[in-house]
Image (cartoon, rainbow, N blue to C red):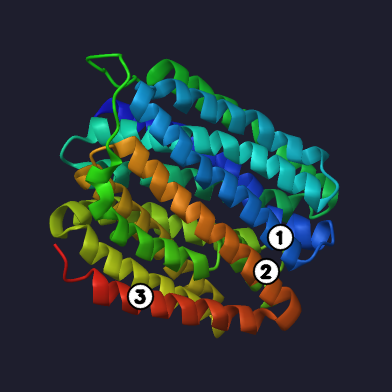
């Protein structure tokens, strides 16, 4: 395995360690510490998701046109590293939303170009390359969730503890920046002039991606799963254990799904991933919370590895298509989060769950009709 994939995996390990120290507790911080509603959490999720994904279109296209790769990756990780700790100084949901949006700009800058690097250094084994990277990525998230659990368990659950965790994210964030600057190589381009893009060559990929966009519109985000666990009776202290389980599931299966993508193809794995997503939502509807988190992990890791590999294999303008993919996820996940948050706040959690389950089942049927038999 190329060393750049390993180093990029380590960069993601430390970055996502910091991210999980935030995301594991942020829904609890907003709803139960700041005393804002689930509808406000939905707005925060929507803002962060939209910024994170929509701007990937811009930076993906710019990367392909001007052949800029590693500089975007470096700046993206740097912005994320320095903004996460600033959450310690927030006192309103609006301030949280603003900082999450700023931090997600860093994610937007680096994501499509990072996938471009992984695609280049993976060669013909893109499933394996993305599988290994995702394994290290999620291992970092699991480590961050473990840190959050230990802090809440041994120190407490007051506002000072939450803010202390936010501040501590600076350490893994800076480690990630050092690794990407000094240990990751840029793509060795043979020419440096502007490249003319022809996105019409990639139109054939859109139907496959659009189905996923629709599924993500209706699917509960991780944050809603966390609030659901709290409402179902899990204590604030032990909710990070569920996030650890979510990340552990992804860590131990990511490489396997990567290998299976290379072996049997992306569409068969995507079919399986949609099934996992449906099972996860049905599980939490019936308050089988642990099972829901496990199947959510299986859905997330299998679907993302499949689509990233699908783009790597089929796209002509890889960074641009990665950007379009992430942008489509942004738009649909953002609007979905707002609607789900509003339904939850006004009509109750069961109504929100029925809305989600009905939607993803319809999308899955459309996928079977329009995609499963296509080459």
Of circles 1 and 3, the one toward us is 3
The residue singled out by tag 1 in the image is 41
Q: Is residue 67 left or right of residue 293?
A: left
Q: Position of residue 317 (x, y in %)?
A: 28, 37
Check contact, mark 2 vs mark 1: CB within 8 A: yes
Q: Nearer the viewer, residue 372 or 90?
A: 372
**Is 242 located above or below residue 369 in the figure?**
above
Name the secondary structure under disc 3. Answer: helix
Q: What residue is pinned by disc 3?
A: 364
Considering only vertical position in the picture, is 310 above or below 6?
Answer: below
For marks 2 and 1, give the CA distance. 7 Å
Residue at 40%, 56% (x, y): give it.
250
The first of marks 2 and 3 along the sequence is: 2
Q: Spatial distance from mark 1 to mark 3, Cα to Cα?
A: 27 Å
Query: How many residues crowd around disc 1 within 10 Å: few (fewer than 14), some, or many (20 or more)?
Result: many
Mark 2 or mark 1, which has the lower sequence index? 1
Name the residue tied to disc 2.
Answer: 341
At 32% from the left and 19% from the top, the residue drawn is: 194
Asked whether the beta carbons under mark 2 and mark 3 sit within 8 Å of each other, the answer is: no
Quadrant including the N terminus: top left
């Amino acid at each position: 395995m190329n060393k750049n994939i390993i180093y990029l995996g380590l960069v993601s390990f430390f970055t996502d360690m910091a991210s999980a120290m935030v995301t594991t507790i942020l829904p609890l911080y907003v709803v139960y510490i700041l005393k804002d509603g689930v509808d406000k959490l939905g707005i925060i999720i929507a803002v962060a998701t939209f910024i994170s994904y929509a701007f990937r279109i811009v930076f993906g296209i710019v990367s392909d046109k001007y052949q800029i790769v590693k500089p975007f990756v470096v700046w993206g990780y740097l912005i994320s590293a320095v903004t996460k700790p600033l959450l310690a100084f927030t006192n309103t949901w609006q301030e949280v939303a603003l900082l999450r949006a700023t931090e997600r700009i860093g994610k937007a800058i680096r994501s499509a170009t990072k996938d471009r690097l992984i695609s280049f250094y993976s060669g013909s084994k893109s499933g394996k390359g993305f599988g290994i990277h995702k394994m290290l990525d999620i291992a970092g998230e699991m480590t961050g969730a473990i840190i959050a659990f230990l802090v809440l368990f041994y120190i407490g659950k007051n506002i000072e503890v939450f803010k202390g965790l936010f501040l501590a994210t600076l350490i893994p964030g800076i480690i990630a920046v050092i690794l990407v600057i000094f240990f990751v190589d840029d793509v060795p381009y043979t020419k440096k002039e502007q490249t003319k893009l022809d996105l019409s060559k990639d139109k054939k990929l859109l139907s496959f991606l659009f189905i996923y966009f629709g599924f993500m519109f209706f699917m509960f985000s991780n944050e809603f799963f966390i609030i659901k666990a709290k409402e179902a009776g899990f204590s604030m202290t032990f909710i990070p254990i569920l996030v650890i389980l979510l990340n552990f599931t992804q860590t131990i299966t990511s490489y396997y799904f990567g290998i299976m993508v290379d072996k049997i193809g992306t569409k068969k794995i995507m079919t399986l991933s949609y099934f996992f997503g449906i099972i996860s939502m049905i599980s939490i509807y019936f308050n089988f919370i642990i099972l829901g988190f496990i199947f959510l992990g299986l859905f997330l890791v299998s679907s993302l590895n499949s689509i990233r590999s699908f783009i790597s294999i089929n796209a002509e303008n890889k960074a641009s298509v990665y950007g379009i993919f992430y942008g489509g996820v942004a738009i649909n996940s953002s609007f979905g989060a707002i609607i789900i948050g509003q339904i939850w706040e006004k009509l109750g959690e069961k109504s929100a769950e029925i809305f989600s389950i009905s939607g993803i089942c319809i999308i899955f049927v459309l996928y079977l009709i329009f995609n499963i038999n296509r080459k």
